[in-house]
Image (cartoon, helix red, strand yellow):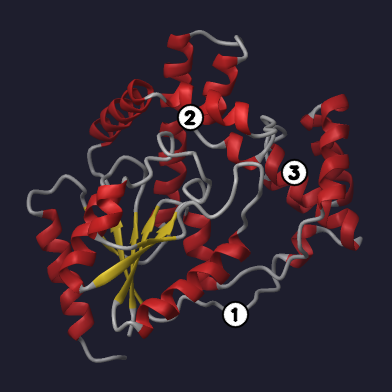
Amino acid sequence: MTSVLLMGPTATGKSALAIALAEALDGEIVTVDSAQVYRGMDIGTAKPDAAARARVPHHLIDLIDPTDAYSAARFCADATEAMAAIRMRGRLPVLAGGTMLYFKALTEGLSALPRADPGIRAAIDAEAARAGWPQMHAELARVDPVAAARLAPGDSQRIQRALEVYRLTGQPISSWQGRRAPAAGGDAIRVALVPRDRARLHREIAERFDAMLAAGLVDELAGLRSRYALEPSMPSMRCVGYRQAWRYLDDEIDRESLRQSGIAATRQLAKRQMTWLRSTPARAFDPWTPGLADAVLDAVRSALAAPPD
């Protein structure tokens, strides 16, 4: 049995469409979202609520605490296990979300990179706190100019990983990235929600972020900070919305700046997702087409009925 991959930028209705597909096709949803894996981060990740999860089983949600880290490699392992269990029940895996790196890792295989080393990461973070990430980028340029040329001086997460790999192995990360482990995604029907109306997407993003603020995003983060030993450099706190709310709670920005910076960051995320989708083979649909669910369902049913190549 194959699987369905439902991809698209944020604020395009992927979650609702995934539920409609899963209900119609006797499926279960595997969430492809690097933020929804964190417990307690519900509002800012637009996590499906209890009613949605009661309608259709959802997998890979609430896996870890926000003090922990999650990776594409762990996602591939977790998703592969979830898909196998779904298929054993005679049901269809519907993989839905907006973390494009996870889709890429699952369908194309992972670079055979070494595992993260908490000690080395902590040392790099300490150096960055003293010297700044542009200086760490300069260090990366000396040991791995190929990787450094691809990264902005402020891209702390990727600079940290590239330096970590070099310090672990003595080899640049660019030399590791050509070595790929086998893909685990198998045969898949790929569906992409690709907005034609960019202005409407921007309106939807603004309305969605306003709704998160009204629902208590800031209070949610305050509660998380009281329960966990969180730092703004942690992957969970780099997520869009939480990063801006952290600055608000620390009195670095006011409420309107929180709103504007959160909307701007979400738009930037959507732009990166759209760029990735343009190079990804998939059946594309405009998310605001009348009768979208029926059109996508028809396309998926046709693909499921087609004989294998």
Q: Earlier in the sequence, mark 3 or mark 1?
A: 3
In this rendering, position of residue 189 left or right of residue 183: left
User: In the rendered image, which quarter is residue 148 located in?
Assistant: top right
Image coordinates of residue 135 in percent, x first then y, are: 84, 31
Identify the residue shown where x is 79% and y is 38%. Answer: 137
In this rendering, position of residue 117 left or right of residue 298: right
Does residue 109 lie above or below 187 as drawn?
above
Residue ID for mark 1: 182
Mark 2 and mark 1 in contact? Answer it, CB < 8 Å.
Answer: no
User: In the rendered image, which quarter is residue 88 located in?
Assistant: bottom left
Residue ID for mark 3: 159
Does residue 150 lie above or below 85 as drawn?
above
Secondary structure under tag 1 reads loop
Q: Quadrant of the N terminus?
A: bottom left
Q: Amino acid at mark 2?
A: Gly
Give the number of the mark in front: 2 or 1.
2
CA separation in Å, label 3 and label 2: 22 Å
Q: Quadrant of the C terminus?
A: bottom left
Residue ID for mark 2: 241
Q: Amino acid at mark 1?
A: Pro
Q: Amino acid at mark 3?
A: Ile
Identify the residue shown where x is 56% and y is 31%. Answer: 224
Q: Earlier in the sequence, mark 2 or mark 1?
A: 1
Secondary structure under tag 3 reads helix
Q: Residues within 10 Å of mark 2 (few under 14, many from 20)?
A: many
